[in-house]
Amino acid sequence: MFSTSISKRLRTAAIGGLLGIAITHVAELGDKLEEPEVRYQAYLFIALIAGCVALAAVARRAPEGPWWTSVLSVSVLPFVAFIVSRTVGLPGGEDDIGAWGEPSGIASLLFEAFTAIVAVRAWQLLASARERVPARASRRTPRAELARERS
């Protein structure tokens, strides 16, 4: 575990990003539900919204590793899906190809990128903290063995 202060700030930032991702997708959900050829996207939006809200709700209680992995997933996957939908297109959504300037899409990309960056930074700090723990344990081991030898 890394510094509690840094951990709280990163989790707070991630919560803001998660809620931003959810809100931007709620704004587009109605349109997706009305279009039968892309209704599957509406269901994916619903799953994403629920996932973001659930992650935000359990942020203070969830174990860091799994929580940050989930945060990274729900921020990167829709980012990639947006890129795919605007380049080669998603099934039934060919009219989205080239539609890069939609305000809700841009807002979503910004929230997703921000949240992914926060999650990656948290993972870097977690990895760094894990590397330091074994180093401390290995320094204690010789002393413990020395104490055992003396007794």
Image (cartoon, rainbow, N blue to C red):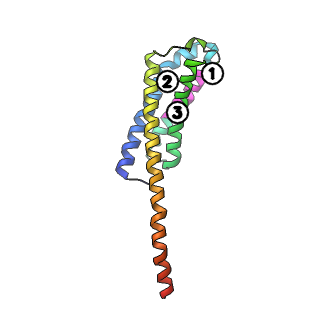
* CA neighbours of label 3 inside 10 A, class few (<14), some (14 to 19), many (20+): some
| Residue type at the position of mark 2 | His
The mark closer to the camera, 1 or 3, is 3
Q: Residues within 10 Å of mark 1 (few under 14, many from 20)?
A: some
Please name the residue that numbered disc 2 is placed on: 25
Decide: marks 1, 3 in contact (CB < 8 A)? no
Q: Is residue 79 left or right of residue 5?
A: right
Residue 141 image label = none
Query: Is residue 38 rendered to the left or right of residue 146?
Result: right
Residue 40: mark in rendering:
1
Q: Which residues are magenta?
A: 40-52
Tell me where residue 144 appears, x and y as whole percent.
Answer: 48, 78
What is the number of the mark on residue 76?
A: 3
Marks 1/3: CA–CA distance: 19 Å
- Residue 67 rendering spot, x and y as whole percentages: 50, 44
Q: Is residue 111 magenta?
A: no
Residue under the image location 55 percent in, 31 percent down: 77
